[in-house]
Image: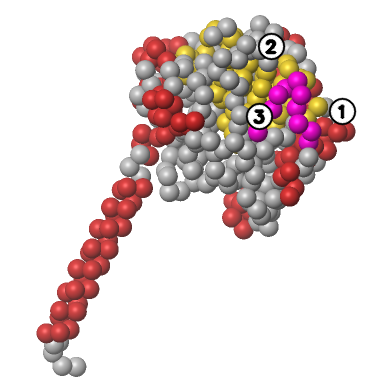
C-alpha cells in the first residue's frame, strides 16, 4: 500500500474530531439527564430527627420495621413465584398499557366558600394522588404530577395519562399528606411547586421530613408523625396508622417510616391505605377509628413475589370490610406501569369481588369528583379503553 494521502489524513483527523464531539455531547447529555438525581434521592436523618426515629417503637435493629403482629397475605387467585419476574416484566405477554387514551375529567372542586359542613367528596387524579374535600376543608394525598415516578426525568415508569389538571389549578388545601417516600408517592418537582403555590403543612411519617427539608420546604410546614400520633389542622384530625410496606429512595432501605392515614372531621371520616400488604392491623384500625365513610384502597402493582407489601384486589375488599368501610374507592392503578399484571386487571378483579361480597364501590375516571353520599354507579369505563 502506498503512503497515506493528505486527503486521507484530513478525513481521519476530521473523524477523530467528530467522534470526540459526539462523545462530549453524549457526556453532556448524560450529565443533564442525571443532574437532579442526587437531589431527588432526598435527605438523610440527622440531629433531632434521627434521635426521634431511634426512639420510635417501629425502629428496631437500625431500621423501621413492619408491625410485629403482621400475618402473611392471603393466597391470591393467580400468580406464582416460580418464574423469572424480570424477564416477564420486559418480555411478558401481559397487556400492561391501555389501547386507547384514558378518559380524563376536569374536576369541579367544591367552592372555596362552601357552607355544607357535612359534605364529603373525593377527587382521584390518578395513581394514589387524591384530594379529599371534607367538611369544607381539603387534604391532598400523595401528589405526583411528574411525567415519571423516578429520580430521573428520562428513565423510569412513565405516565399512561396526563394529570387531569395542573398543579397551578389546584384549589387551596389545608394539608398535604404523604404515605411514604417511594417515587410514585413522593415527587421532588411536585413538592417544589406545592411549596411555592400552597401554604399547607406536609404531614408525613417519621423521617420523611429529611427529604422535604433538603428540597426547601420550610421547617414550620413539616409535621412528622409516628403510628398512632395525630395532628390537628383546620378542624381535621390526621392520624398516622400502621401499614405493612417498606421505604427508601436510594440504596438504603427503611430509614423512614411508612403509614396509612385516618382523616377525621367532626362528622365524617376517611381511611387511606398508602401502600401495604394485607395484615391484621386493618381490623384494629377499624375498631379504633372506624367506621369510615369512604376508604381509599390500594389495588394495583401486586404480584405473588411481593404479596406482603402490596395487596391483591380481593385482599383490598377484605381490608375494607375489616376497616368497617362504607364506600370503597380504588387507587394506585391506571397511571404507572409498575407490575406484570394487565392494566385493567386490578379493577376487574375488584369489581367482581365487591359484587360477590356486597360492598359499595365507585370507580371514577381520573379527575372525576365523587360525592360520597351519592357516588356515580360503576359503569366499566376502563373496559372500553383496555
Real-space CA distance between mark 1 and mark 3, rounded to the nearest whole angstrom: 23 Å
Real-space CA distance between mark 2 and mark 1, rounded to the nearest whole angstrom: 26 Å
Answer with the quarter of the image where residue 71 lies: top right
Residue 386, image x, y percentages:
70, 50
Residue 365 visible in the picture: yes
Label 3: which residue? 369
The part of the chain drawn in magenta is: 368-378
Dot 3 falls on a residue whose secondary structure is: strand
Dot 1 falls on a residue whose secondary structure is: loop
Label 1: which residue? 358
Q: Check the image and report above or below for 304 versus 56.
A: below
Dot 2 falls on a residue whose secondary structure is: loop
Dots 1, 3 in contact, CB < 8 A: no
Real-space CA distance between mark 2 and mark 3, rounded to the nearest whole angstrom: 16 Å
Residue in the picture at 53% in, 36% down: 165
Residue 4, image x, y percentages:
15, 87
Label 2: which residue? 118
Amino acid at each position: 500500500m502506498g503512503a497515506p494521502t493528505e486527503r486521507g489524513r484530513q478525513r481521519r483527523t476530521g473523524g477523530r474530531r467528530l467522534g470526540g464531539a459526539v462523545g462530549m455531547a453524549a457526556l453532556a447529555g448524560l450529565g443533564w439527564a442525571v443532574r437532579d438525581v442526587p437531589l431527588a434521592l432526598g435527605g438523610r436523618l440527622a440531629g433531632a430527627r434521627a434521635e426521634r426515629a431511634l426512639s420510635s417503637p417501629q425502629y428496631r435493629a437500625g431500621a423501621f420495621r413492619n408491625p410485629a403482629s403482621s400475618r402473611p397475605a392471603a393466597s391470591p387467585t393467580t400468580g406464582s413465584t416460580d418464574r423469572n419476574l424480570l424477564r416477564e416484566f420486559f418480555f411478558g405477554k401481559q397487556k400492561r398499557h391501555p389501547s386507547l387514551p384514558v378518559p380524563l375529567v376536569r374536576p369541579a372542586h367544591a367552592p372555596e366558600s362552601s357552607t355544607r359542613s357535612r359534605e364529603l367528596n373525593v377527587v382521584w387524579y390518578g395513581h394514589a394522588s387524591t384530594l379529599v374535600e371534607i367538611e369544607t376543608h381539603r387534604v391532598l394525598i400523595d401528589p405526583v404530577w411528574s411525567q415519571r415516578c423516578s429520580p430521573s426525568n428520562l428513565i423510569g415508569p412513565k405516565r399512561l395519562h396526563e394529570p387531569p389538571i395542573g398543579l397551578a389549578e389546584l384549589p387551596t388545601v389545608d394539608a398535604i399528606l404523604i404515605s411514604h417516600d417511594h417515587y410514585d408517592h413522593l415527587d421532588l418537582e411536585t413538592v417544589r411547586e406545592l411549596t411555592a403555590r400552597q401554604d399547607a403543612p406536609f404531614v408525613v411519617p417519621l423521617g420523611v421530613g429529611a427529604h422535604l427539608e433538603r428540597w426547601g420546604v420550610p421547617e414550620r410546614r413539616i409535621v412528622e408523625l409516628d403510628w398512632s400520633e395525630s395532628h390537628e389542622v383546620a378542624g381535621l384530625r390526621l392520624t398516622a396508622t400502621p401499614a405493612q410496606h417498606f421505604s427508601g429512595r436510594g440504596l438504603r432501605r427503611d430509614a423512614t417510616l411508612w403509614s396509612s392515614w385516618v382523616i377525621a372531621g367532626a362528622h365524617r371520616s376517611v381511611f387511606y391505605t398508602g401502600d401495604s400488604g394485607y395484615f391484621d392491623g386493618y381490623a384494629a384500625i377499624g375498631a379504633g377509628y372506624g367506621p369510615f365513610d369512604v376508604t381509599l384502597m390500594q389495588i394495583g402493582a401486586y404480584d405473588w413475589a411481593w404479596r406482603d407489601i402490596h395487596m391483591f384486589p380481593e385482599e383490598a375488599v377484605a381490608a375494607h370490610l375489616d376497616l368497617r368501610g362504607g364506600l370503597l374507592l380504588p387507587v394506585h392503578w391506571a397511571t404507572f406501569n409498575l407490575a406484570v399484571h394487565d392494566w385493567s386487571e386490578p379493577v376487574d378483579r375488584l369489581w367482581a369481588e365487591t359484587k360477590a361480597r356486597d360492598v359499595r364501590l365507585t370507580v371514577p375516571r381520573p379527575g372525576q369528583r365523587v360525592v360520597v353520599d351519592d357516588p356515580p354507579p360503576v359503569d366499566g369505563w376502563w373496559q372500553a379503553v383496555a
